[in-house]
Amino acid sequence: MSTESTGSIDPTNGMDASDPTASMPKEIDKPRVEQVGQDDRVAHGKELQKWFIGVGTAFALLLLGGAAHGLLSNRWGISEDILLLGKKLSEIPTEIGPWKCTQDSKLEENVEKMLEAKGYISRLYTHQTTGESVSVFVVFGPKGPIAVHTPEVCYSARAVTQTSERTATPVEPEFKEGNLWKLAFETNTVDKRKMNVFYGWSEGGPWQAAANPRFWRTDYLYKIQTSCQAAGKKEDSTDEFFKLFLPELRKQMRQVDG
């Protein structure tokens, strides 16, 4: 007895043998690869360029900062010009009109080191007729240590008493904006002798009675400080001395514009 069949089953894999595609392996699913367009590549290139520019700029600023700090801190030594400027102070005459240097002192080693002085004079000028003396200290060095020391601190431990607040006083007529601080003291002796102290700073231009003498435009400063006790007079002779001394000092100072 025969039975009509519409298809047969392959006993080995259970597939329908009448289906011509049944014996073909199914296509394996492939991972999808996202296609990067031209615009995406350009955008990525720009971001990478910005990163390199940023890193390069930061590195350049770091190098410039290190170089600037090295120059300001004298890490690589003092330039010859600075040393020459300091030495020029010693060329100030020891005899100026009736005023003659009767004492030329050296700073103590620790003081000179503290000030980082590149040049200075510490002299006593005495008037050959009246016998009155003016003590003069002029120093040239880095603005940091030169700017911070003031007579208010120096004279507080001496045998004098401050009798006035400091006032800005013109000292060089040719510089309309030039001033020095003036302080009045009195000796703690029986005769109570009056003493005036003048001080100020300069980068090479007019002297300045600066409240905060940092002078950001320069790395090195001059400082002047004088003291004079009145000899039986109401006022001392500092003004007379300045008229002769300051022009001689100006000849040995560096010149600056403005």
Image (spheres, rainbow, N blue to C red):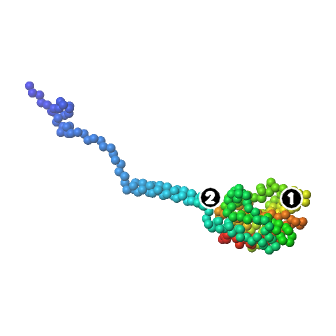
Answer whether residue 126 is visible to the viewer in this image: yes
Residue lying farthest left?
1
Q: Residue at x 78, y 65 (%)?
A: 103
Q: CA distance from mark 2 to mark 1?
A: 40 Å
Compare residues 45 and 37 and report the one nearer the observer.
Answer: 45
In the rendered image of this protein, does residue 148 appear above or below residue 207? above
Compare residues 178 and 107 and report the one nearer the observer.
Answer: 107
| Quadrant including the C terminus | bottom right
Residue 105 in the image, given as x and y percentages of width and height = 76, 63
Label 1 amino acid? Thr
In the rendered image of this protein, does residue 61 appear above or below residue 170? above
Answer with left or right where residue 8 lies relative to residue 175.
left
Answer whether residue 239 is visible to the viewer in this image: no
Residue 187's disc number: 1
Residue 115 in the image, given as x and y percentages of width and height = 70, 58
Residue 87 in the image, given as x and y percentages of width and height = 68, 67
Label 2 amino acid? Ser
Check disc 2: other Cα within 10 Å, few if <14, some if 14-19, many if 20+.
few
Q: Residue at x 8, y 25 (%)?
A: 1
Residue 73's disc number: 2
Q: Secondary structure at mark 2?
A: loop
Task: Examine the image and state in which quarter residue 185 appears.
Answer: bottom right
**Nearer-N-terminus badge (2/1):** 2
Check disc 1: other Cα within 10 Å, few if <14, some if 14-19, many if 20+.
some
